[in-house]
Amino acid sequence: MRLRINGEVKTIDNSDEEFFLEGLIKHLGYQPQLVVVELNGIIINPNSWINTKIKDGDCLEVVTIVGGGSYS
């Protein structure tokens, strides 16, 4: 399966017939609680990842949340 992830085309070898967003995020090595995912231009609620099917040609943007900042 070919996907565009953060602007880069990647080939994902999925042995399962169906591939879901939750599995993809884990497969890519992201910590699910620290990312926001946009699939084909729509931000996907993390509660929906388990039911969101990924298909060949999908475009994902994965943004990692980083804590921190400065105090004045």
Image: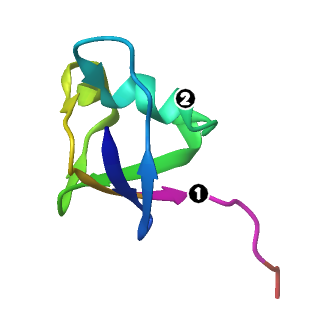
Q: How is the image coloured?
A: rainbow
Q: Secondary structure at mark 2?
A: helix
The disc label shown at residue 30, or none: none
Q: For residue 29, which quarter of the picture?
A: top right
Please provide percent x and percent y for residue 20: 29, 24
The disc label shown at residue 65, or none: 1
- In the picture, which quadrant includes the C terminus? bottom right
Please provide percent x and percent y for residue 11: 43, 44
* Residue beneath the point at 56% across and 38% down: 28
Q: CA distance from mark 1 to mark 2?
A: 18 Å
Residue hosting label 2: 27
- In the picture, which quadrant includes the N terminus? top left
Please provide percent x and percent y for residue 48: 23, 28
Q: Secondary structure at mark 1?
A: loop
Amino acid found under the numbered disc labelled 1:
Ile
* Residue beneath the point at 76% across and 66% down: 68
- The residue range painted magenta reads 62-69
The magenta stretch spans residue 68: yes
Amino acid found under the numbered disc labelled 2:
His
- Count neighbours of disc 1 (C-alpha within 10 A) and say few if under 14, some if 14 to 19, many if 20 or more: few
Furthest toward the bottom, the residue is 72
Please provide percent x and percent y for residue 70: 81, 79
The overriding secondary structure of the stretch rendered in magenta is loop
Q: Is residue 26 left or right of residue 13?
A: right
Between 6 and 62, which is closer to the camera in this rendering?
6
Between 41 and 34, which is closer to the camera in this rendering?
41
* Residue beneath the point at 67% across and 60% down: 66
